[in-house]
Image (cartoon, coloured by chain):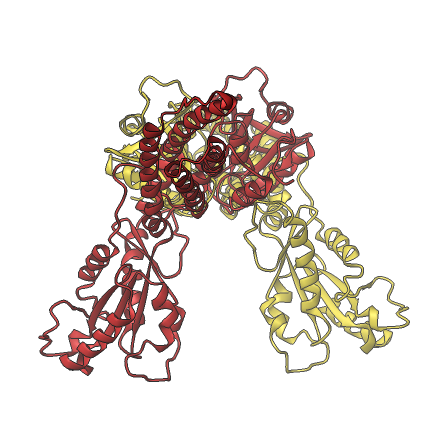
Chain colours: A yellow, B red
Amino acid sequence: MIFQADGATICALSTAPGMGAIAVIRVSGPDAIGIGDALFSRDLRRADSHKALFGVIRKGEQLIDEVLLTVFKGPNSFTGEDVIEIACHGSVFIQNQLLQLLVENGCRYAKQGEFTFRAFFNRKMDLSQAEAVADLIAAESAGAHELALNQMRGGFSNEIAHLREQLINFASLIELELDFAEEDVEFADRSQFTKLLFEIEVVLKRLIDSFQTGNAIKTGIPVAIVGKPNAGKSTLLNALLNEERAIVSDIPGTTRDTVEDRVNIEGVSFRFIDTAGLRETEDVVEKIGVGRSKDAIKSATIVLYVYDVNEHTDASIAAVEAQLQHDLDPSRQSLLMVGNKIDEHADHSSSHTAHLFISAKHKTAISDLQETLINLSNLRLNTEGSTVTNIRHYEALTSAYTSLQEVLIGMENAVSGDFLAIDIRKALHHLGEITGEITSDDLLGNIFGKFCIGK
Amino acid sequence: MIFQADGATICALSTAPGMGAIAVIRVSGPDAIGIGDALFSRDLRRADSHKALFGVIRKGEQLIDEVLLTVFKGPNSFTGEDVIEIACHGSVFIQNQLLQLLVENGCRYAKQGEFTFRAFFNRKMDLSQAEAVADLIAAESAGAHELALNQMRGGFSNEIAHLREQLINFASLIELELDFAEEDVEFADRSQFTKLLFEIEVVLKRLIDSFQTGNAIKTGIPVAIVGKPNAGKSTLLNALLNEERAIVSDIPGTTRDTVEDRVNIEGVSFRFIDTAGLRETEDVVEKIGVGRSKDAIKSATIVLYVYDVNEHTDASIAAVEAQLQHDLDPSRQSLLMVGNKIDEHADHSSSHTAHLFISAKHKTAISDLQETLINLSNLRLNTEGSTVTNIRHYEALTSAYTSLQEVLIGMENAVSGDFLAIDIRKALHHLGEITGEITSDDLLGNIFGKFCIGK
């Protein structure tokens, strides 16, 4: 079992790896204060919680660093255990020295996600909140950030807890009936419960449906750029990518983990799929230039077809458009036709008023293109409740929904209470998986194993 | 003027750039607490200094993050000003959002080294201590780390301050004489002062001489690996490099900024120079294989000549060794002869008992080689005082030493007090440059411009 409470005191670098002005090392567990006290120049055993103390850390006689050390006494800490945070000078050498010193004095290197696991284990947060911590750290757009933060703060957990509570009340009455089965009483008013079940069904349905939007926000809206060779596909992609980099790069001291071929526009993340192909030499010239991108088109929410305005008549491009429209699924996919290279074209009047006309090379009308992408992304955020972003939650909700359907069918057919109870318990089980009332080691290992070290 | 106290409140990311579990943003200046108070959910104006507060940061209605925020009230802070440190979740998105928010609320992005500059400006540390902060962050070996830490904690500053104090006493008595010149009195006992000057001269000489060692510790001891093609030079270098990487890589959560071709052995840093050549195809086969490495050999402290034991007779290698010895400067350079490929050699007895016999490929006797490198590095650390690691300090000390010589010559030739006073003032000036009593904008810009952002 990877994830269990083994009573160890764990340590890890909590700030980004590499050299910085400062770095923070976090220690959590029953001996955190004792181990810190042995190494630090000031008395930690009598230190106030949450108070930063300036002092030095020594390895025997040898000075390792001047640090700011803060004690967080459990349960008022991130993990719920005693925690110390050491803010040291940010050299990699010092980081390594301090970690080695902590291990020599009884700490164990923390596993990925182990601090957050302990916060979950000590009931500082439930499982969906713990998952949101990882999502928050990985969030790269305003939308993903907002959803993760809301989930971390318990918005989604509360909604699930409320559903479970209603179902548990219902289940307990049904099960009470079973105890009095011979007397043939009905504690649970069937019509009232049917009404409640329909209400729960609506909420579950809304949460399940929100996943498409939530997932698009979290992982980015998939866009396929297609078109004939030399239509300017990669120039267009670069124009979109560079636009953003220019905005980000004026903040000193921050770098961007460049996620290849991903662009944030007004807080919405777009993911350009199968773009590797854009940069290859495309030596097979075919009629409309989408042959090699068939798979990309299938998984795209937006298909962006680029054509050279100098090489098409209005009629020929209308034929292309018709063919593309035919291939797409209008319920989930949008087509955006983009006429490129207007700078080389004296007269670019066109009958295709719905098309966008740009010059990728000269960055003409790129902002119009961005605006159109935003409009086509068509994200419908739940205004009345949470948005599901996690496929594990989506699957658990779907399973809960199926069990609920069984209950409803049972009610309709007036099956006996013991059969109803089984399906209600199933629904409760699946809802409990989301918040972590129901867990397994595999599940926990899978969730926390995706965290970065130090969290 | 880049570096001046402009009264601005400055902000920067202080931890390493990129994604981590947490990140720390530092704000310093007169409005630090006020700006923090406007954004944070709790009352900072009445907050205790050094106390970590848990709360949220909002941009208007929009939640940016849950953070731990600590107020450090000036002068009890790193910069001596009011400081707030915000420990947020470590996504790059959140880091950027918080920095933008701080700037929108009246902060300015900090320049490189600006926090440390302010610490210097507010007399929390002198200039040589400020320089040591940058050295400490960049230190990659135990030796460099120890020297930087000692310098940051004021060991070197105290020594310089003591020298200055003695000289100032002397100078003021000499200048007092000038005021009473017509009366022809001597306040300053010449023989006693000559003794003092000799004492100061000894200390200066010791500090100046320590620079060779200090610089080698800080920047690494330059080693040139030379030899004929296929002698196994790059295999040997890789064996030395890999040995170290294996040790470092078992600490989770820390990465090493790989400094190409640098190896730490027992806390001493070795720098392999001009190693690019080792990996090129060497198509010009020449007699002893050092032709392309002449420059590397000149700047090396240790020249490591590798030969294939299977291709040499004892006599032929003796000739090579004699020629190399002839080319080196024995006062500052050592030669290390290494016979490689002993694994392919049934009998590797040799009359060259001073040579080292290894197999780079099978990593045989690599630890002997490491030990020999340590012995040849011959670092003589000052046991009775500081070790100079900074070329600016070295130059200032050398200038002070020259002025002191002038004073001593003047004393010997009984020149008048006003001439003595000029040279003493010069010596004082140069010593004052080290600790920052004497500065210029160029000097400050040069020193602090080398810092990383956020320090």
Asked which quadrant contains residue B401, the reply is: top left
Work out which residue is located at the far top of the displayed protein and give it.
B46
Asked if B237 appears above or below B291 in the picture, the reply is above
Q: Position of residue B30 (x, y in %)?
A: 62, 24
Which of the pair B317/B31 is nearer the observer? B317
Q: Is residue A427 visible?
A: no
Q: Position of residue B25 (x, y in %)?
A: 54, 35
> Does B353 sit left or right of B166 as displayed?
left
Q: Residue at x 24, y 66 (%)?
A: B335
Report the quarter where the C terminus of chain A lies.
top left
Asked if B230 appears above or below A328 in the picture, the reply is below
Q: Position of residue A14 (x, y in %)?
A: 42, 39
> Does B55 sit left or right of B352 as displayed?
right
Q: Position of residue B294 (x, y in %)?
A: 36, 72
Total numbered labels: 0
Which of the pair B31/A233 is nearer the observer? B31
Report the quarter where the N terminus of chain A lies.
top left
Q: Is residue A283 visible?
A: yes
Asked which quadrant contains residue B188, the reply is: top left
